[in-house]
Image (spheres, grey):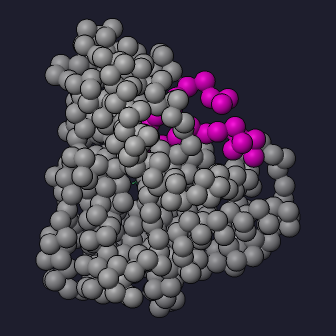
């Protein structure tokens, strides 16, 4: 790998050489048929990943742009949106939707915990909700939502199910034609960014609309956006030689390569790998006397929020790690200084995570904390290869 550092923040994630190579291909005109073919292919691969019979939009921007596209194209000003939040990124939908005059109601979990299906069911019983947002993995807490349980509850209430997959897509199942107990109970919208579990540099927002979500857009004469109106993009996504606004040609080259790598690994295999990786990393770090915020049953395959041993200095710990080439993220809100976040998703290799565990152990020892490095690595390997 060309990378000099191990970028283990919860996105961007380490970029592999084939993707860098694609990114640095010669720039073409955005309506060049050779580019259009690659763009089209990347969209097709997204459709396969989400198994959707709807439409996928790949737009210059970030995950937040994809969130905005999901909301404004399904919920009109004055309509009701329920935000099911497991932390910082779930909460982001609140100001985002309010800007557009949407009536927002919120269910907020205690950090590190899940919102139960009963809570959502009771809230939806009040009636009138056009859509519900659920964050598949909240990147602030490392908690995953129980999609299996929430889809039927939301669909039964007649609302659209919008899934923020920014920290999950390509690492966890998000099958838009899977029925959850009834033929009509399916996920309506999934969105992500290029830089998390897909493993491409930041720069693209991706959003998939199923048939019911597309119908919701059709039912609105206009929406609160121009660049973000999916109707402006649909002709381009279907036939990329068409023009609406210039797509980021080189980012699409990189994204197409990233999606090819995802599909070449195979979705099932990739989901299993991430499941094993999450469990193994948490187990390894636990050997060092650290404690995952989320209980294992609700902990995400893609990233973990890890509470430090008593008294460990956060800034010093992360600076020391960075000087040895391991980049992790601080924790957010009330957990700031008490925990760190480590991403374990995308195209990073087992060797990389073993090395990271070793460097974490060495850093702890330097700071006067006991750390049995061999035991941590053995724990990691044992779980990674058996989970
Ligand atoms: C990173 C993230 C976002 C925001 O994505 P940006 O690309 O930073 O705009 C939204 N939701 C979740 C779950 C995320 O992890």
Residue in the picture at 24% in, 13% down: 369
In the displayed structure, 78 sits above or below 175; it is: below
Residue in the picture at 60% in, 44% down: 201
In the displayed structure, 94 sits above or below 255; it is: below
In the displayed structure, 210 sits above or below 44; it is: below
Q: How many marks?
A: 0
Residue 106 percent across, percent down from the top left? 22, 66
Residue 64 percent across, percent down from the top left? 46, 57
In the displayed structure, 296 sits above or below 349; it is: below
Give the residues drawn in magenta, as a range.
1-22
Residue 319, visible in the rendered structure: no
Which image quarter: residue 109?
bottom left
Residue 202 percent across, percent down from the top left? 57, 47
For residue 129, side relative to residue 40 (left or right): left
Q: Identify the image quadrant of the N terminus.
A: top right
Report if residue 3 lies within the magenta region: yes
Residue in the picture at 73% in, 53% down: 253
Residue in the picture at 27% in, 72% down: 150
Q: Main secondary structure of the magenta part?
A: loop
Report if residue 169 lies within the magenta region: no
Q: Name the residue nearer the viewer: 164 or 332.
A: 164
């Amino acid at each position: 790998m060309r990378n000099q550092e191990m970028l283990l923040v919860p996105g961007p994630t380490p970029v592999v050489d084939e993707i860098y190579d694609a990114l640095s291909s010669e720039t073409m005109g955005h309506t060049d048929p050779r580019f259009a073919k690659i763009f089209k292919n990347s969209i097709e691969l997204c459709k396969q990943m989400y198994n959707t019979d709807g439409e996928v939009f790949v737009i210059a921007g970030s995950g937040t742009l994809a969130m905005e596209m999901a909301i404004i194209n399904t919920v009109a000003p004055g309509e009701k949106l329920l935000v099911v939040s497991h932390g910082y990124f779930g909460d982001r939908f609140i100001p985002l939707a309010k800007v557009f005059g949407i009536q927002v109601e919120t269910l907020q979990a205690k950090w590190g915990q899940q919102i139960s299906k009963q809570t959502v069911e009771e809230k939806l019983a009040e009636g009138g909700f056009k859509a519900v947002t659920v964050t598949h993995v909240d990147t602030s807490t490392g908690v995953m939502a129980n999609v299996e349980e929430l889809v039927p509850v939301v669909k039964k209430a007649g609302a659209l199910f919008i899934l923020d997959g920014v920290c999950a897509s390509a690492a966890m199942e998000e099958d838009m034609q899977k029925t959850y107990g009834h033929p009509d109970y399916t996920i309506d919208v999934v969105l992500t960014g290029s830089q998390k579990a897909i493993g491409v540099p930041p720069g693209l927002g991706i959003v998939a609309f199923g048939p019911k979500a597309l119908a919701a857009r059709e039912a609105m004469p206009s929406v609160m956006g121009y660049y973000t109106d999916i109707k402006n993009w649909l002709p381009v996504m279907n036939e990329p030689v068409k023009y609406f606004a210039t797509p980021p040609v080189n980012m699409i080259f990189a994204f197409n390569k990233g999606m090819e790598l995802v599909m070449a690994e195979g979705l099932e295999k990739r989901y299993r790998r991430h499941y094993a990786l999450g469990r193994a990393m948490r187990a390894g770090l636990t050997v060092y006397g650290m404690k995952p915020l989320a209980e294992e049953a609700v902990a995400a395959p893609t990233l973990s929020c890890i509470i430090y041993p008593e008294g460990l200095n956060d800034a010093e710990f992360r600076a020391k790690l960075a000087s040895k080439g391991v980049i992790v993220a601080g924790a957010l809100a009330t957990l700031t200084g008490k925990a760190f976040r480590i991403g374990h998703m995308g195209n990073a290799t087992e060797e990389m995570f073993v090395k990271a565990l070793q460097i974490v152990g060495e850093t702890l020892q330097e700071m006067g904390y006991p750390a049995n490095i061999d035991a941590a690595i053995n724990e990691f390997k044992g779980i990674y290869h058996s989970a």
